[in-house]
Every structure is written in structure tokens, then in C-alpha cells.
Image: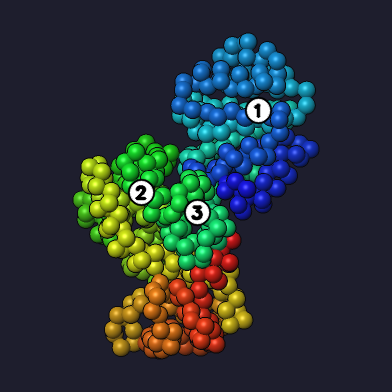
């Protein structure tokens, strides 16, 4: 199975149901680059469907390219000249004898050269309700594709019959994709995240070290400048986004810190930070029980594992890599890699909580908690979640080390929970997530390992 199709069965079935309805449909497919959007479409469409991959050419050349694709099923279609998008749409509709699918991939390229096309499509959809083809638009620019159908000012607003957002794969699939142990799966996911194209290329190498060196650290590696490509999909310039992620990767997590380092007012960064959150590249982290409006303790973290790896290890060493000092950079990565994986492991644990049944209960999404305890000393708890029935609180400790003492971890966790001021009236449940467990420790309840978490995250 192609890696793009791990966990894509539901999307494929839903897309097939959409495009084979009795009436013609308008479908939007979008998502981050390299997540398998094009493969999903190619696996779903039939031999006589029209698939056109747009590119940055001028609009007349784009129309000529589309006409050539149509000519494959409508003989002689490309022999005519089409001076506008309206003319080619109506000509196609008049030429078809039976329902087909018209797929335009990387549609944002066409919008860039011909902004009026959204209005043309709106008019065509409204005026030709019995058209002979389904229209499927696909693109990697998440903001532009969302704007087409979710922005009330867009001509196409409210007209899509189906909207598919193709997201990165969950961590649980990586063990199957690479055929590796749970521990290796956590480490591998910590580098590549859930992007199937990254997995596909990384699999060509004998181990994780070689894949990192060849694909990322080598200045000719295919992912050496990957963030630039991602951000240019979304905005005219990548400079501000790259600067923000560089600072977050270096340990600046508060808005005031980021603004100070950039020499900007904090208020001027609200929009770019919100955009990066919306795109899924960074996340806001709040202490459990607090909201964005109620707290000033918001932290910004890089949400995507690959980007976090890139901005933590590669971006600060770009100058060294330009001189091919790869071994020196990799040596630095190896020294800090276990601590880095521990952070990703902790995030995966929190991500898994809503899908867990712990102590016979289901749980709401988990957060960290940090602040002053009752004794006014600073403390932190890795996992805090409220049960669905709102009668219990779950507190958890997450460790990524080979020498975790389970009894000490529980004792330490319980001592910290006693210092919290918001537990009154709740049943308290504690749990531990560790890298591995000795056979004589399995008698303890609520101890979980990577195997348990990966099984849930599918």
C-alpha cells in the first residue's frame, strides 16, 4: 500500500460517494503539501475523467494545457482557441455526452494568474445546474483554498457540496509504515511527523540517521529547505513566518519574548501567529483550566514534529551545513535527541487522552498545568484532563528515559497533585507514561508505554 493511503480509506469512500451522486457536485480538496491529496484524487477518478495539474504559467497557457487534457477524451477539443475560462467551461459542457469529473489540482496557481476565475466558476455553477461534469478543485495553499469556500466575500462561498481537508497521518500508522518497534516509531515520528511523503522517502534509507543526513542535513537534500516551500504556499513572503518559527525553535515561547527579539510590538504579531496556528504549524499552550482570555501565560510551541526538528536542530546550524560540516551538526543532534523525543512523546500522550479509557472513564482533551502550588512553589504536571462526566480529574507524568522508577514517579506525582488548588470535589486518577516497563512493574495500574499510545493514535 502506498503510504499516502494509510488511513485514507474513509476519505476515498466519502469522495466516491460525492462524485457519483445523481446530480453534479462541486468539491474542494485541500491540505498541506505532501500529504497525499493528488494521490487520493488519482486513486479515486476513472480512466475517462479529466485531471489537470495547474502551474505558475500565464492563464492562456493554463487554458491550453487544460484543453490538451480534455482532448484526451473529447477528440479535437484542443484544436480550438479558448480566450477565457468561461469559454472553455461551456465548450467542455457542450462536448460531453455523459457525466465525468473535472479535477483541477493546485488550483491556487490559476487564481494567482486569473483572480476572476472564482467569479466565472460561481456564475457557471449557478447558471448550469445540470452540467455534465463534477468540478473538483484541489490545492496546497490552505489559506487560499479555505478562503474560496469559507470566506463570505468569496464568489464561491456556500457553493461547495463537499469539503475535504487532508491532514497528516496520526503517529500510530508510522510503526506499520516502517515495520519498526514502538520505541523506534516514536523516534521516527519525532523527525518526520505525519507527512506520508516524508515517510516514503525516509524508508529508502537503512536507518533514521542516514535518512536525516541525506534528506535534511545535506544542503542538496530534498527537505533541506522544506519550510520555505511550505510557507510560500500560504503567503507572499516566508520571512516573517520563518523568523517566528526560528525563535520558537530556539526556546522563545512567550509573545513578549518573540516580539522583543523581532523588534516589533506584540500586537503586530497577533495576526501572523494566529495564521500559523490556523495552518497547524504552531499551537497555543495554556495551563489546564484557563482560557486565552483569562490568562497571560499563553505559550507558543511548534506543533508539527518535522518543523520542530528543523528549527531546533537545522536552522541554527545552517552556516555549518553550507560548509558540509554535517558530522558536527549530527553530533549535536545526537546529544540532545533523547530530550527532544521526550517532548514529542509527551505531546503524543496528551493527544491520545480523548481516545483512552483510563480507570473505566472517558476523558476530555488533555493539557499541561504549570504554576504555583498551595505552598507557593513552582510545579508542573505533564497531563491533566477532566472526565467526560466531569466527576474526575486525570493527572499524569510522562517520561522518556531508560531508568524510570515507577514507584517514585507515582509518589512524586501524588505529592504535586496535593499542592493543587482546583481538585476539590473531584475523584483523582493518576497515571504514568514511560518508555518501557519491567515485567515486575505490570502489576501497577495506569502504566502506559509507546505500544499503548501508538495503538490508540490511528
Q: Closer to us: mark 3 or mark 2?
A: 2
Is there any visible trace of residue 295 in the rendered image? yes
- Judging depth in this view, the residue of 243 and 224 nearest the camera is 224
Q: Where is the C terminus found, in terms of image quarters?
A: bottom right
Q: Please tell me which of labels 3 and 1 falls first in the chain.
A: 1
Q: Which residue is mark 2?
A: 213
Mark 3 lies on residue: 194
Q: Residue at x 27, y 58 (%)?
A: 332
Give the residue pinned by disc 1: 50
In whole angstroms, how far apart are the C-alphas of marks 3 and 2? Answer: 19 Å
What residue lies at 37% left-to-right and 36% top-to-bottom?
236
Q: Is residue 108 above or below residue 207?
A: above
25 horizontally vs 81: left or right: right
- Which badge, 3 or 2, is on the more N-terminal residue? 3
Q: Can residue 235 be seen here?
A: no
- What is the secondary structure assignment of the residue under circle 3? loop
Q: CA distance from mark 2 to mark 1?
A: 40 Å
Q: Quadrant of residue 330?
A: bottom left
Residue 295's place in the image compared with 64, above or below, is below
N-terminal-most mark, 2 or 1: 1
- Helix, strand or loop at label 2? It is helix
Q: Quick one: SS at disc 1?
A: strand
Q: Residue furthest front?
A: 206
Q: Describe residue 13's horizontal placement relative to residue 275 as left or right.
A: right
Q: Position of residue 150 (x, y in %)?
A: 54, 44
Q: Is residue 52 above or below residue 272?
A: above
What residue is rendered at 43% in x and 61% in y?
187
Q: Please give the name of the residue rendered at 58% of the width and 67% of the height, measured from the top-left corner.
A: 456
Amino acid at each position: 500500500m502506498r503510504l499516502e493511503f494509510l488511513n485514507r480509506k474513509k476519505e476515498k469512500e466519502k469522495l466516491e460517494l460525492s462524485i457519483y451522486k445523481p446530480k453534479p457536485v462541486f468539491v474542494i480538496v485541500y491540505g498541506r503539501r505532501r500529504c497525499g491529496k493528488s494521490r487520493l484524487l488519482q486513486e479515486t477518478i476513472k480512466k475517462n475523467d479529466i485531471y489537470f495539474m495547474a502551474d505558475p504559467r500565464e492563464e492562456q497557457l493554463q487554458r491550453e494545457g487544460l484543453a490538451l487534457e480534455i482532448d484526451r477524451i473529447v477528440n479535437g477539443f484542443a484544436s480550438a482557441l479558448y480566450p477565457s475560462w468561461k469559454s472553455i467551461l461551456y465548450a467542455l459542457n457542450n462536448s460531453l455526452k455523459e457525466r465525468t469529473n473535472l479535477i483541477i489540482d493546485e488550483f491556487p496557481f490559476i487564481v494567482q494568474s486569473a483572480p476572476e476565475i472564482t467569479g466565472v466558476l460561481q456564475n457557471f455553477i449557478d447558471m448550469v445546474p445540470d452540467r455534465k461534469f463534477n468540478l473538483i478543485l484541489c490545492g496546497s495553499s490552505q489559506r487560499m483554498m479555505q478562503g474560496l469556500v469559507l470566506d463570505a466575500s468569496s464568489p464561491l462561498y456556500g457553493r461547495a457540496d463537499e469539503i475535504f481537508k487532508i491532514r497528516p497521518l496520526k503517529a500510530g500508522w508510522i510503526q506499520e509504515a516502517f515495520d519498526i518497534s514502538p520505541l523506534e516509531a516514536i523516534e521516527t515520528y519525532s523527525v518526520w511527523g505525519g507527512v506520508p511523503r516524508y515517510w516514503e522517502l525516509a524508508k529508502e534509507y537503512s536507518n533514521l540517521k542516514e535518512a536525516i543526513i541525506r534528506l535534511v542535513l545535506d544542503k542538496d537534500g530534498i527537505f533541506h529547505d522544506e519550510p520555505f516551500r511550505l510557507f510560500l504556499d500560504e503567503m507572499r513572503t516566508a520571512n516573517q513566518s520563518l523568523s517566528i518559527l526560528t525563535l520558537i525553535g530556539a526556546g522563545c515561547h512567550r509573545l513578549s519574548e518573540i516580539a522583543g527579539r523581532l523588534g516589533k510590538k506584540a500586537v503586530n504579531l497577533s495576526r501572523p501567529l494566529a495564521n500559523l496556528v490556523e495552518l497547524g504549524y504552531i499551537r497555543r499552550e495554556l495551563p489546564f483550566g484557563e482560557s486565552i482570555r483569562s490568562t497571560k501565560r499563553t505559550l507558543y510551541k511548534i506543533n508539527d514534529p518535522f518543523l520542530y526538528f528543523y528549527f531546533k536542530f537545522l536552522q541554527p546550524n545552517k552556516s555549518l551545513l553550507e560548509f558540509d560540516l554535517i558530522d558536527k551538526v549530527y553530533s549535536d543532534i545526537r546529544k540532545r535527541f533523547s530530550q527532544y523525543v521526550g517532548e514529542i512523546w509527551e505531546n503524543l500522550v496528551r493527544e491520545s487522552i480523548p481516545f483512552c479509557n483510563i480507570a473505566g472513564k472517558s476523558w476530555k482533551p488533555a493539557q499541561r498545568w504549570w504554576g504555583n502550588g498551595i505552598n507557593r512553589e513552582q510545579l508542573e504536571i505533564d497531563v491533566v484532563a477532566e472526565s467526560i462526566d466531569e466527576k474526575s480529574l486525570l493527572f499524569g507524568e510522562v517520561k522518556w528515559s531508560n531508568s524510570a522508577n515507577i514507584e517514585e514517579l507515582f509518589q512524586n506525582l501524588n505529592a504535586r497533585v496535593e499542592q493543587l488548588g482546583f481538585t476539590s470535589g473531584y475523584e483523582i486518577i493518576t497515571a504514568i507514561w514511560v518508555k518501557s516497563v519491567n515485567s515486575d512493574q505490570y502489576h501497577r495500574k495506569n502504566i502506559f508505554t509507546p505500544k499503548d499510545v501508538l495503538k490508540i493514535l490511528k
